[in-house]
Amino acid sequence: MARRRQIYEGKAKILYEGPEPGTLIQYFKDDATAFNAQKRGTINGKGVLNNRISEHVFTLLGNIGVPHHFIRRLNMREQLIRQVEIVPIEVIVRNVAAGTLSKRLGIEEGTQLPRTLIEYCYKDDALGDPLVAEEHIACFSWCSQDELHDIQDMAIRINDFMSGMFAAVGIRLVDFKLEFGRLYEGDFSRIILADEISPDGCRLWDMTTNEKLDKDRFRRDLGGEVEAYQEVARRLGLLPEGGDHTVLDLDSHRKKRDK
C-alpha cells in the first residue's frame, strides 16, 4: 500500500491527501497538549473516542442545516472530510465563566454568564493564539464582514443545539471552540464548520456534580482522562453501558488477538 501524502500535522490530528480532489483524510491522535503545547502527554484511546464523538455531533448538526466539512468516518481513527481554506480565527463560545475568562476578568469559575459570549483568537501557535476583537479581524482582512456574520450565526445555532443535546444526557456545556473554513465552489466560496467537536475543545461538566468530563482533567492534573472521555461517549449512546471491552487502541487489540 502506497504511503499517503501528509498535508499537515497539528497537536491532535494529522491531515492526509484524500482519495478524490477536494477531500482530505483526518487522523485523530492520542497526543494531548495544553497551555499552547507547553504541557504534553498522551491519553490512550482519545483519538478513537474523539473521532466517534465528532462524527456524531457533526452528523446531527448537518441534520439541522449547519454546513460542515465532515463526509464520513473511515475507521476507528480516521474520517473523510472536505478540503477547506481555514479561516485563521478560533471562535470561542462561552455559556459559563471558566478557564482563561475567569482568570482574565476575575469571575468565579462556574458563574453563569448573563448571555452567551463569543470571543475570537488569532490562530498562531507562535503567538499563543492571542485574543482579538472584531476590529482586528476586519483590519487585517482575516475574513469579510459577511463571512463573520455567517460564522456568528452558525456559532449561536451550534451552541443552542449542543447545549440541549448535552443537557439531555446530564452534561453542562460550559464553553467550546470552533473553527471554520471556506469551501470553494467554482469562483465562489462559502463558510462551513471545520476541525472537530470533542472533549478536547469543549468544557463539559456533569450537571449534578460539576465533575469535569473534558481535557481540563489533563490540563489540571486531575487524572481519569480516559474515563471522562468514555463517559461523554457513553452518555451520547456511542459506547455501551459498562463498555470496558470497547476497543480503543487498534494496535493493542491486534496484539492481544494474535497472542
Image (tube, grey):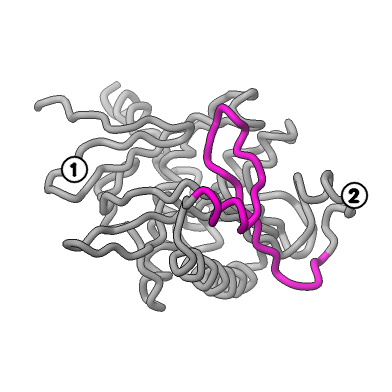
Q: Could you tell me residue 131's position as x and y percent? A: 66, 46
Instruction: Provide the residue designation for mark 2.
Output: 106
For this orientation, the residue located farthest to the left is 1
For this orientation, the residue located farthest to the front is 139
Q: Is residue 164 above or below residue 71?
A: below
Task: Tell me which amino acid carries mark 2.
Answer: Gly
Q: CA distance from mark 2 to mark 1?
A: 46 Å
Q: Could you tell me residue 236's position as x and y percent? A: 51, 63
Q: Could you tell me residue 216's position as x and y percent? A: 69, 41
Q: Quadrant of the C terminus?
A: top left
Q: Residue at x 59, y 24 (%)?
A: 40
Front residue of 152 and 145 = 145
Q: Residues within 10 Å of mark 2 (few under 14, many from 20)?
A: few
Q: Is residue 233 above or below residue 35?
A: below
Q: Which label number is shown at residue 78?
A: none
Q: Under tag 1, what secondary structure? A: loop
199 drawn magenta: no
Q: Is residue 185 left or right of residue 179?
A: left
Q: Residue at x 57, y 24 (%)?
A: 41
Q: Residue at x 45, y 56 (%)?
A: 143
Q: Which label number is shown at residue 18?
A: 1
Circles 2, 1 touching at the beta carbon (< 8 Å): no
